[in-house]
Amino acid sequence: MLEIFIELTNQIFWEGYAQQLAKENPAGFQFEFNEFINSYNN
């Protein structure tokens, strides 16, 4: 799921968005990733 999340955010925002977010704001990255997972598990 992580790879899919990274691919999706690269397409929506810019290449490297997820990596930059994880580095600069780990809590924000985790929140966004959790939201992504929850939206596909319902």
Image (cartoon, helix red, strand yellow):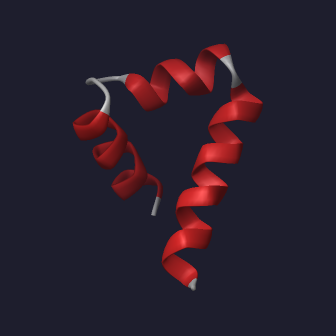
Residue 24 in the image, given as x and y percentages of width and height:
64, 14
Q: Between residue 1 and residue 31, name the one nearer to us.
A: 31
**What residue is rendered at 53% in x and 59% in y?**
36
Q: Position of residue 7 (x, y in %)?
A: 29, 46
Quarter that holds the N terminus = bottom left
Vertical position of residue 8 compared to residue 40: above or below: above
Residue 4 pos. (x, y %): 35, 57
Residue 3 % position (x, y): 37, 53
Residue 37 as seen in the image, left or right of residue 15: right
Position of 31 compared to 40: left or right?
A: right
Residue located farthest toward the right when viewing the structure as drawn: 27
Q: Nearer the viewer, residue 6 or 36?
A: 36
Residue at 60 percent across and 27 percent down: it is 22
Q: Relative to residue 9, is residue 1 drawn left or right?
A: right
**Is residue 21 positioned above or below 6 on the image?**
above
Q: Classify residue 41 by image quadrant.
A: bottom right
Tally the marks: 0
> Residue at (47%, 54%) from the top-left corner?
2
Q: Residue at x 69, y 21 (%)?
A: 25
* 35, above or below 12, in the image: below
Q: In which quadrant of the rendered image does the C terminus lie?
A: bottom right
